Image: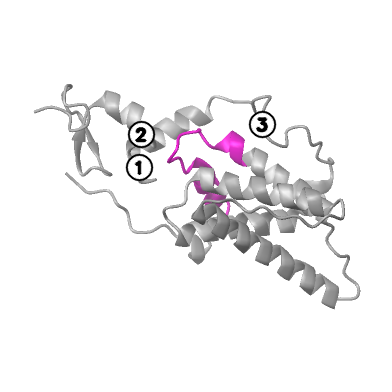
Amino acid sequence: MSCPICDRRKPARFCPAKGEKICAVCCGTEREVTIDCPSDCSYLIAAHRYENGHQCSLPADTPLLGEKIPQDIVYTHQQLMAALAFSIAKFCAVQPAAVDTDVLAALQSLAQTYKTLSTGIIYEKPPDAPLPRELYAALVGFISEIKKQQSERASSAILKDSEVFYLLVFLYRMGLLRTNGRPRSRCFIEFLRGQFPKSPELQREESRIIVP
C-alpha cells in the first residue's frame, strides 16, 4: 500500500482532509497547498506552532510598506481596530472557504481606496475575486455605518479617511506576518478568531476530523 498522493512512499499519517493515511513527506509539502487542512488537525497545529516560533519580516516589495503609521493611531482607535478584526473573523466564520489570501487582498484594496479618499479623490477598485470582493464590501458597509452613527451624535468626532487608512494598513501588515504564505493557509483568520474566544458568532464548525 502506498501514499494516495505520491503513490511511492508508505502512508504513515492519517489525513482528516483526505479521510485516509498519507506519507509524512506529502503531509509536509501539500499541507495548505493542495490539501485543504481542517484547523483542528494535530499535524497542522504542530506545524503552525513551529512556524510561530520563527519570526519573519516583510519583503522589501510589500505593498504599502513605505507608509509610516502614526504611533498613537492604533492606541487611539483600539475599539475600532477590534471591531474591524471581529468583522473579518465573522465574515470568515460564515464563509468557510475563505483563506488568508482572500482577507489580505480585501485589506490591501480597501487600504488603497482609503488612501485615495484621504486625498479628496473618490476612486474604488475592489478585488476581482468573489470572496475578497464580498469582504471588501462588508468592511465598506461597516465603516460607513460607523461614520453615520458618529454624524448623528453631535458630540462625536467623525472618523477621518486617513485614520481608517492607517488602521487598514496595520491590519494588512499584521496579516502578512501572521500567515505562512501557503495558498490555503488560514493562520491569520484563526489568529483573529482567537481574539474573540467567547463570541458565539465565531464558534468553530463541527470538527471535520474523521477518526480512522
Residue denoted by label 2 = 31
Disc number for residue 200: none
Residue at 51%, 51% in the rendered image: 129
**Vertical order, 1 against 136 (above or below):** above
Q: Are marks 3 and 1 in contact (CB under 8 Å)?
A: no
Label 2 residue SS: loop
Residue at 66%, 31% in the rendered image: 62
- Colour style of the rendered protein structure: one colour
Q: Is residue 66 left or right of residue 57?
A: right
Q: Which residues are magenta?
A: 175-196
Percent of width and height locating residue 43: 34, 34
Please tell me how many numbered marks the rendered image carries.
Answer: 3
Residue lying at the far left in this picture: please name it. Answer: 1
Q: Quadrant for the C terminus, please.
A: top left
Residue denoted by label 3 = 62
Q: Is residue 104 left or right of residue 124?
A: left
Q: Quadrant of residue 138?
A: bottom right
Residue denoted by label 1 = 37
For marks 2 and 1 on the same chain, the one whose residue lies earlier in the sequence: 2
Label 3 residue SS: loop
Percent of width and height locating residue 27: 30, 30
Q: Are marks 3 and 2 in contact (CB under 8 Å)?
A: no
Q: Quadrant of residue 104?
A: top right
Residue at 73%, 52% in the rendered image: 113
Q: CA distance from mark 3 to mark 1?
A: 27 Å
Q: Are marks 2 and 1 in contact (CB under 8 Å)?
A: yes
